[in-house]
Image (cartoon, rainbow, N blue to C red):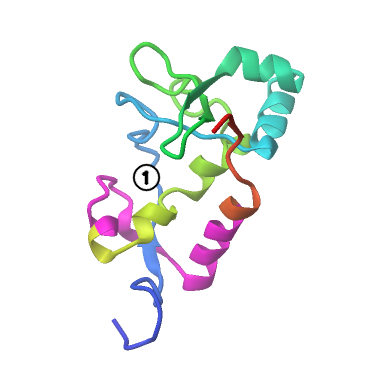
Amino acid sequence: MSKTAGPFYADGLRFSCTRCSGCCRHEPGFVFLSRQDIRLLAETRGMVYNEFVETYCRWVPSPEGGEWLSLKEKANFDCVFWEGGCAVYSSRPLQCRTFPFWKNNLLSVRAWKSLSCPGINRGELHSREAIESRLEKRRSEPVLTRGG
């Protein structure tokens, strides 16, 4: 790695999704949604905004107090939209589109290397600018909250 000033990913990071579906299945988790995510997903499913929220979403406790809006899961912990693959891939939520370039995963080399995903450190090199663009996208499209 060069001596470029900045975060550990200043020279970029390698990641290519292998479509293993490991992040979509078998373990409990949350897919937090922005207002834009819901609009796009509702349109894709041929639903109105409130109908989509009532059908596919749930409110979960936020560590900051209040609640965040998340997709529901199936009883086996698969994403509600996993049907032998992502049934909404072209309109998947921002959280899914920006994985693994999330704030907590980019705090340190250790955080990055702790990710159990076969695409980490393989394939396409994502520049610092591209990574930070994903972080900015999340800041500009915050997760929906209530209470707190």
Residue at 40% x, 39% y: name it: 19
Q: Nearer the viewer, residue 124 or 102?
A: 102
Please state the horizontal and vertical placement of residue 11, each as a whole percent of the image: 39, 77
Residue at 38% x, 74% y: name it: 7
Quadrant housing the N terminus: bottom left
Please state the horizontal and vertical placement of residue 16, each as a whole percent of the image: 40, 54
What span is colored magenta in the figure? 111-137
Residue 124 magenta: yes
Residue at 25% x, 45% y: name it: 116
Residue 145 magenta: no
Above or below for 112 versus 147? below
Above or below for 117 versus 67? below
Please state the horizontal and vertical placement of residue 55, each as a whole percent of the image: 61, 12
Q: Residue furthest toward the bottom? A: 3
Q: Mark 1 highlights which residue? A: 18
Left or right: residue 125 versus residue 22 is: right
Please state the horizontal and vertical placement of residue 107, each as a whole percent of the image: 34, 61
Left or right: residue 40 versus residue 2 is: right
Q: What element carries label 1?
A: loop
* Amino acid at the residue labelled 1: Thr
| Residue 49 placement: quadrant | top right
Q: Which of 23 and 142 is in front in this view?
A: 142
Label 1 crowding class (10 Å Cα cut-off): few <14, some 14-19, many 20+?
few
| Residue 147 placement: quadrant | top right
